[in-house]
Image: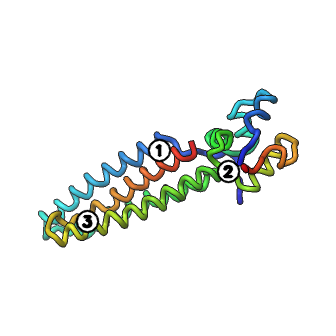
Amino acid sequence: VKNRLRVLRAERAWSQQDLAERLHVSRQTVNSIENERYDPTLPLAFRIARVFEQPIETIFEEEA
Amino acid sequence: MNIPAESTSIRPRVLLKVLIASAIYVAAVRFLTWFIENHPDSRWRVVAAVAPIAATGILAAAAMLSARGMDERDLRVHLEALAFGFLASVVFVTTYSFLWLAGVVPMQFELLSPVMVMFWVAGIGIALWRYR
């Protein structure tokens, strides 16, 4: 699954640690999601959408 | 799924502690084996024989408790590492057993726990590399 996490985070000038604290996960988890090495579960994906105040489908996109 | 307030992560320092603890465990078991074999009349033989069980139990409890503070990615790393450690240990024990039957190697039960821990640590390394 592709995602725009890195772009959205950069727009807000948040560090990975900042975002990790907002999501209650480790910085390594944010890094793994940004590098598209790890796909978050649905609950975490919804938390990400809530933190960025955007619909989930604008953040995550299924790879063709 | 419960979300930990502050998620911890699997850090190399933790793995180093596990490896050091495993080395101490092997040394302690070697000493206890020597003690049991060379003190057949000692009343401490039974205590010496069951001492490693307590140590192994504490290690297992520590591993379980450490998993409670992990987030979902680290739990997956933990799960994959346990699966790798278990399956690799099965392959190791099977191979070692046949080698023992063939008379190539001596039977050393006390090495099984450290070998499983080694495979578990290797599994963590592999999973961390996968989700890097």
Please give the chain letter of the residue carrying mark 2.
Answer: A
Q: Position of residue B125 (x, y in %)?
A: 46, 47
Residue occupied by mark 3: B96
Element type where label 2 sits in the image: loop
Farthest bottom residue? B101
Q: Residue at x 87, y 47 (%)?
A: A55
Residue toward you, B122 or A3: A3
> What's the residue type where badge 3 is placed?
Tyr
Residue sitting at x 83%, y 40%: A52
Q: Is residue A9 above or below residue B59?
A: above
The residue lying toward the viewer, choosing from B82 and B41, is B82
Quarter of the view holding residue B48: bottom left
Q: Residue at x 63, y 42 (%)?
A: A32
Q: Which residue is mark 1?
A: B14
Look at the image and tell me in which quarter the C terminus of chain B lies: top right
Numbered label attached to residue A39: 2
Do discs 3 and 2 belong to a common subunit? no
Answer yes or no: are tags 2 and 1 on the same subunit.
Answer: no
Which residue is at the far top? A13
- Mark 2 or 1, closer to the camera: 2
